Structure formats: structure tokens, C-alpha cells
Image: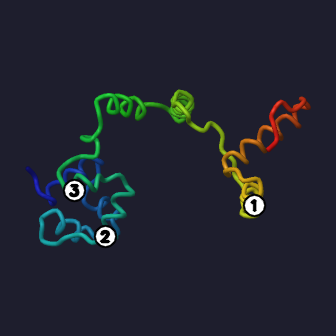
């Protein structure tokens, strides 16, 4: 089993970076990176956070167990395919996958703080959940836009 310093070097190489470029990602000098990889010094949390943002598997650094090792074969297969997709292809796959998840909310709504407060107050006054209130408002607004007679019941 390898140790932290060896795994750090493995992660750097996995990302295809030399010590200088990897050091820059972590906000340290090349000499400091060399010290980390030789075990003379231990990195601080700022360095670890920075390299994690660059794609380093921090779990692997500390435990020797890759985050991908925790995936099922189905998840690994899906991840392999997802990594090969264009942005458009990925968006299409995500839309399809989202539509197949049972009970998944298919709409999102962005409210200002003031609108959120108004919806919360209306829900409290009506004695229903915020989610129920938002569904009711969305349906009524859609019916109004489409000029259809309301088929839903008001509470």
C-alpha cells in the first residue's frame, strides 16, 4: 500500500502535470511541492482545498481508497460514458436521466427574497406546505396564460 507522498505524486501524474504546474495549482513553490512528494513536509488545508478544486481525489490521498472505488459497476459505466460526451450530449443525457427518476421535481423556480417571503406567508395563511402552494400557483398561472378554464380546486 502506498503512502500519502506517493499518492500525491500519483494524483499529480494522473492529472498530467509536472511538479511546477501542480505546485501552482496548490499555491506553493516547486520546492514546496517537491518536499510534499518526498515526505519532508505535509501540506496545509489551503493547499489541499486548492488541489481538490483542480481534480485531485483527496479521499485517495488520505485513505488510499479512490472515490471511484466506491462506485458500483453501473455507476462506473455511466461515468465513463459521461466523460466522453460533448456538453450538448451531456445535457441531453441529464435531461433524459432526470425524467426517468421517480418523483423527481421536473421544474425549478427562482424567486427573489421578497417573492419567497410572500409565498411562505400565503402558504402559512392557507395552512399548506410551500411546495403545495408553489404547485398551485404554477398551475393557476399556466392556466391563465393558456386561457383554459381552471380544473384545479382552490384551497
Mark 3 or mark 2: whose residue is earlier in sequence: 2
Q: What residue is shown with label 2?
A: 45
Expressed as whole percent of the image width and height from the top left, the position of residue 17 reads: 29, 52
Q: In the displayed structure, does residue 2 sit left or right of residue 42?
A: left
Sequence-first disc among 1 and 2 = 2
Give above or below for 27 relative to 142: below
Task: Of the two numbered discs 1 and 3 on the same chain, state the one appearing first in sequence.
Answer: 3
Say if 95 sits above or below 133 in the image. above
Residue that label 3 marks: 61
The residue at the point 32 percent across, 32 percent down is 76
Q: Which mark is residue 151?
A: none
Q: 117 or 122: which is nearer to us?
A: 122
Point 15% across, 60% down: residue: 5
Whole-percent x, y for residue 14 in the image: 26, 46
Q: Disc 1, disc 3: CB below 8 Å?
A: no
Task: Tell me the mark number nearer the camera, choosing from 1 and 2.
Answer: 1
Foreground: disc 1 or disc 3:
1
What residue does disc 1 label? 121
Query: Callout 3: 10 Å neighbours few (<14), some, many (20+)?
Result: many
Q: Spatial distance from mark 1 to mark 2, Cα to Cα?
A: 43 Å
Callout 2: helix, strand or loop?
Answer: helix
Label 1 crowd bin: few (<14), some (14–19), many (20+), radius 10 Å: few
Q: Position of residue 48 (x, y in %)?
A: 30, 64
* Cα–Cα span, label 1 and label 3: 48 Å
Q: Residue 103 location in percent, x, y?
A: 55, 34
Q: Is residue 42 left or right of residue 140?
A: left
For this view, does 144 lie left or right of residue 39? right
Circle 3 SS class:
helix
Q: Secondary structure at mark 1?
A: helix
Towards the viewer: 108 or 22: 108
Vertical position of residue 104 compared to residue 12: above or below: above
Q: Are marks 1 and 2 in contact (CB under 8 Å)?
A: no
Amino acid at each position: 500500500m502506498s503512502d500519502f507522498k506517493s499518492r500525491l505524486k500519483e494524483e499529480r501524474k494522473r492529472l498530467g502535470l509536472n511538479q511546477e504546474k501542480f505546485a501552482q495549482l496548490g499555491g506553493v513553490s516547486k520546492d514546496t511541492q517537491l518536499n510534499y512528494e518526498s515526505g519532508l513536509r505535509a501540506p496545509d488545508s489551503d493547499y489541499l482545498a486548492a488541489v481538490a478544486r483542480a481534480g485531485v481525489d483527496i479521499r485517495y490521498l488520505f485513505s488510499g481508497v479512490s472515490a471511484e472505488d466506491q462506485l458500483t459497476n453501473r455507476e462506473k459505466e455511466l461515468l465513463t460514458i459521461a466523460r466522453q460526451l460533448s456538453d450538448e450530449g451531456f445535457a441531453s443525457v441529464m435531461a433524459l436521466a432526470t425524467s426517468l427518476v421517480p418523483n423527481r421535481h421536473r421544474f425549478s423556480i427562482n424567486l427573489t427574497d421578497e417573492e419567497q417571503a410572500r409565498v411562505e406567508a400565503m402558504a402559512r395563511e392557507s395552512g399548506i406546505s410551500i411546495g403545495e402552494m408553489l404547485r398551485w400557483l404554477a398551475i393557476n398561472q399556466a392556466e391563465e396564460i393558456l386561457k383554459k378554464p381552471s380544473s384545479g380546486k382552490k384551497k
